[in-house]
Image (spheres, rainbow, N blue to C red):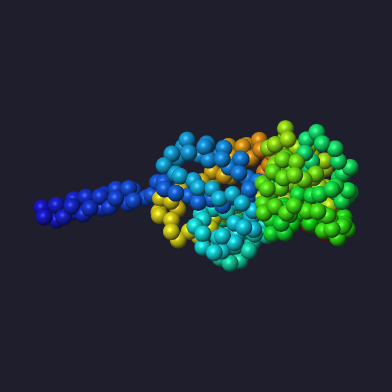
Amino acid sequence: MKKKLAVIALAGIMAAGLTVGNVQAAEPGGEVYVFIAASLANAMEEIQKDFNQKYPDVEIFYNADSSGTLQTQIEEGSRCDIFFSAATKQMDALVEEKLAKEESVVNLLENKVVLIKTKDTETRVTGFENITEAENLALAGEDVPVGQYAREIFTNLDIMDQVEAMEINEGKNVTEVLAAVTQGSNEVGVVYATDAASVADQVEIIAEASSDMLETPVLYPVGMIEDEEALPEEKVAAETFFEYLQTENALKVFEEHGFSPYTAEVEENDTEEAEDTQADQKTDSEAEETGEASTEQEKTAE
């Protein structure tokens, strides 16, 4: 009888342990700190509202600025759970420094670089090629991805020296560049297509950078950051939000704001796999034909 009671008691303890374990398995909650490139701000605000309808106990704090500034803040120890960059350079640096979790990084979105002017104003500038005909230029700094892309365009067009001789209003992020043009402080400026689309009633796109001007694709990688301050429920919340950013619902919001889901890598891999499969099939077919020919020769010899 005592043995039976002991077994029952042990079973009860195990059941209680499982129950406690289930309770201890953290549900998404608490605070999540997300560092985002300034050009993502409008889309991310909308995505946050959608996410909080399903997870109301999660409080998301955005820090929107240039990717270079955000990188520096993370390196200096600012609390961050997710980093959404406007270029791979900053993300790669954090991965190399073991601050970003390499296995989590995904190139999620793609954007375009455009040249804009204030709406209903005159300019002799018709494209990036003759941008130096403008009286002045709003341009992001060299540590800002859109500023780096712009300088790559000018270098490829062999006009970097002439551009540097212009009157330049240098912004610390793309938002400042956009504001300088919308407010009429500068004749033209270089921003992302998504930024221009967000104020289409205030600016006009003069030109979009072609692939021969800008060989580097404008990719937006997102990845998890090591956050030692996060509570268990906050780590779960960060992972849940990170996964939500990759869902069809979130991607639809990004597309509505002018971004394109980045799929080139997948397509390239699929193409390579298809080519390999075709090559294997061809080799197998040739082998079969050779085998059949050998068999026919043997029969003839007999």
Q: Residue 223 in the image: x percent, y percent?
A: 57, 54
Q: Is residue 273 at least partly visible in the picture? A: no
Q: Nearer the viewer, residue 127 or 299?
A: 127
**Is residue 178 placed above or below 81 in the rendered structure?**
above
Q: Residue 218 in the image: x percent, y percent?
A: 72, 51
Residue reaching furthest to the bottom: 97
Residue at the spot x=64%, y=55% of the render?
Answer: 67
**Is residue 18 placed above or below 203 in the rendered structure?**
below
Identify the image quadrant of the C terminus. bottom right
Residue at the spot x=50%, y=39% of the render?
Answer: 51
Residue at the spot x=26%, y=49% of the render?
Answer: 15
Q: Quadrant of residue 254?
A: top right
Residue reaching furthest to the left: 1
Residue 36 relative to residue 121: left or right:
left
Residue 119 relative to residue 226: left or right:
right
Q: Residue 115 in the image: x percent, y percent?
A: 79, 45
Q: Nearer the viewer, residue 189 or 84?
A: 189
**Is residue 196 placed above or below 36 in the rendered structure?**
above
Total numbered labels:
0
Q: Nearer the viewer, residue 265 or 227?
A: 227
Q: Residue 287 in the image: x percent, y percent?
A: 78, 57
Residue at the spot x=40%, y=50% of the render?
Answer: 233
Q: Is residue 3 at least partly visible in the picture? A: yes
